[in-house]
Image: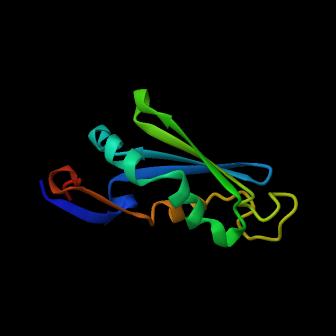
Amino acid sequence: MELIEVPLHAVAHSRAGDKGNRANLSLMPYDPALWPALAEQVTEARVLALFAHRGATRCTRYDLPLIHAFNFIIDDALEGGVNGSLNLDGHGKSLSFRLLSLTVKVPADKLPRT
């Protein structure tokens, strides 16, 4: 089986939310068959490292296998939160795009057809 490295956005989508100084990022593969590959590669440590530059201190991943999704809670990622930050994106809505910039290796036959 040939594996191809692609940006996560090629095989999944994400939404972001916030609660105080915590970012909440969902991740859902377009093809549910990719859920195990994403579970193996999109780890708490990897996501925490991705947001370390923002001061993130912890990342917790919640696996939702019945709906083929993940939920990441990232502590201290919003530079103080909506009311305490001068950040242009105080709600952290664009953080889902940063998550989708990670690369993953997936079987070539599972890539969406364009």
Spot occupied by residue 77 in the image (x, y as percentages of width and height)? 71, 60
Q: Residue at x 72, y 57 (%)?
A: 91
Q: Say above or below: 14 vs 4.
A: above
Relative image position of residue 41 (x, y in whole percent): 39, 54
Q: Image check: 64 left or right of 88? A: left
- Report the residue at 12% width, 53% height from top: 1
Outermost residue toward the right?
84
**Which of the 4 quarters of the picture holds residue 10?**
bottom left
Looking at the image, residue 43 sits to the left or right of residue 1; the answer is: right
- The residue at 13%/59% (across/down) is 2
From the viewer's perspective, tell me whether residue 22 is left or right of residue 60. right
Identify the image quadrant of the C terminus: bottom left
Task: Looking at the picture, tell me which residue is in the foreground, 28 or 38.
Answer: 38
Image position of 102 (left or right of 106): right
Q: How many marks?
A: 0
Q: Identify the residue at horizontal 71%, vertical 59% (top origin).
A: 57
Chosen colour scheme = rainbow
* Image location of residue 104, percent across then percent down: 34, 60
Q: Position of residue 11 (x, y in %)?
A: 33, 54
The outermost residue toward the top is 66
